[in-house]
Image (spheres, rainbow, N blue to C red):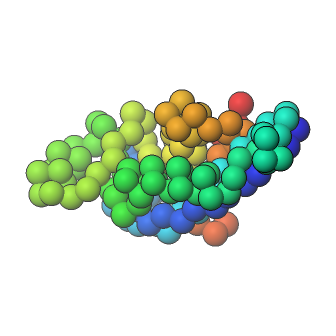
Amino acid sequence: MYSVKKTFHLAYGHRLLNYNGKCENLHGHNGLVEVTLAAAELNGEKMVMDFTGLGRTMKTWLDENLDHKVILAKADPLAPVLKAQGQACYLTDDNPTAETLARLMFDVAERQLRLPVGEVAFWETPTSMAAYRR
């Protein structure tokens, strides 16, 4: 099995509902996303995928949807307030934990962007990471 990995940076804010701790308060992170593509065979160019194509495709989605946005659960009562004030928000079905965001980006890469994704790792801080793979 072959694999390639590309990293992306994003800045975002979030908070966790029904959580007893610092993360129940609105706060921000500078996150790092690692997208690993996997393939049993190489393409005609002898690559899993060109790094430039992977970078352009994934970065475009991240920039349009998560970077410099407030990421909140759909049930968060703060979401309609922020949206009414013109703040850029991305709403998730569940609490926007690192695990939820890793799964979200995996699903987008696989289903929407049609990438042969093997794993997405999401570093919320330099020492805390969650990953999703099949």
**70 displayed left or right of 116:** left
Residue 67, picture quadrant: bottom left
Choose between 55 and 125: the one closer to the eye. 55
Choose between 101 and 27: the one closer to the eye. 101
Give the residue furthest to the left: 84
Residue placed at 28% from the left, 42% from the top? 76
Residue 24, picture quadrant: bottom left
Is there any visible trace of residue 124 in the rendered image?
no
Percent position (x, y) of residue 66? Answer: 41, 54
Which quadrant of the figure contains the N terminus?
top right
Which quadrant of the figure contains the C terminus?
top right
Choose between 105 and 52: the one closer to the eye. 52
Image mark count: 0
Percent position (x, y) of residue 93? Answer: 39, 33
Give the residue furthest to the right: 1
Residue placed at 79% from the left, 41% from the top? 44
Residue placed at 11% from the left, 51% from the top? 84
Give the residue furthest to the front: 44
**98 displayed left or right of 70:** right
**80 displayed left or right of 94:** left
Q: Residue 116, relative to residue 28: is it above or below?
A: above
Percent position (x, y) of residue 2? Answer: 85, 43
Is there any visible trace of residue 102 in the rendered image?
yes
**10 displayed left or right of 99:** left
Percent position (x, y) of residue 54? Answer: 61, 51
